[in-house]
Amino acid sequence: MTGALRRALVDDRDGPLPAMLVALTMLAGVVDATSILALDHVFVAAVTGNIVFLGIALAGAGGSIVSPVVAVAGFVVGAVIGARIVRRPGSHRGLAVRDIAVFKALLAVPVTIVVVVAADPLPPVTRLVVTALLAASMGGQLALIRALKVPDLLTAVLTLTTIGILTEHGTGRHDPSVVRRGLALLAFVAGVVAGALLCRLVAPGAALALGLAIIVGVGVSSHAVGRAEAPWTAPR
């Protein structure tokens, strides 16, 4: 099992990228839990949910129109910026992760500070600004995922990963691909639980501080492998 776990996190095709993306999967769980509990009951990672909320509001069945629109708009802007960023490092996928981590940190640092120092509950305008910036961060992350093409690690979209767990068993439960799918699901659930507990028992700023720590960890790790010229660094 130890060998399968290692190969699920670091392999010949994608090098250390799977391990970093498992961390970003946990991040997605943290920020979605925080946005649902402490902002305007919207998603900042699972953007499809916001489209559902928007449709419900437009149908007059309840809910805010402004909050999901802000979240979707922030996500779109972040995805466009992220797509430009991931093309900058040229052919090195590790550098693409590093640059997106820098982009995310530039958004996460002021957001975390604002949420920590602001009154609880957050004022409406502050909630909208925080929602937009968190959604932009996750849009950039999903642009990175689109560029990296690492199997089973979509970080914020767990539906296909869950279907893989249910229907594709590989060579058994020790198959690295099976282990990777399980790790992704566990990481997301752990992120949701951690984010919810921190919001409920400490403060929303504590949950966002955890998210910032994950971003910094991924950024440092990706910078450390940025000088590698192994086959996994080439685009897919």
Image: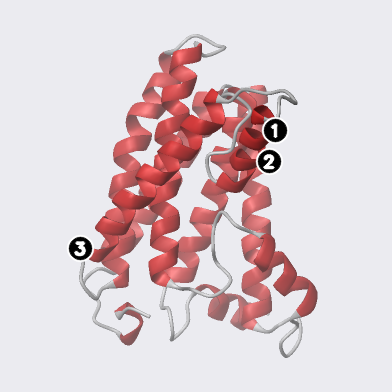
**Side (left or right) of 6 relative to 96:** right
| Circle 3 SS class | loop
- Callout 2 environment at 10 Å: few (<14), some (14 to 19), or many (20+)? some
| Three-letter amino acid code at the position of disc 1 | Ile
Q: Amino acid at mark 2?
A: Val
Q: Disc 3 designates what residue?
A: 88
Tell me which numbered mark, 1 or 2, is placed earlier along the sequence.
Answer: 1
* Between marks 3 and 1 in the image, the one whose residue lies nearer the viewer: 1
Where is residue 161 drawn, in percent x and y? 66, 67
Mark 3: amino acid: Arg
Q: Which residue is mark 1?
A: 56
Evaluate if marks 3 and 1 touch, with contact meaning CB atoms under 8 Å apart: no
Q: Give me the C-alpha separation between circle 2 and circle 3.
A: 35 Å
Q: Residue furthest bottom?
A: 171
* Mark drawn on residue 126: none
Please identify the quarter of the rendering in which residue 153 is found.
bottom right
The tag earlier along the polypeptide, 3 or 1, is 1
Q: CA distance from mark 3 to mark 1?
A: 39 Å
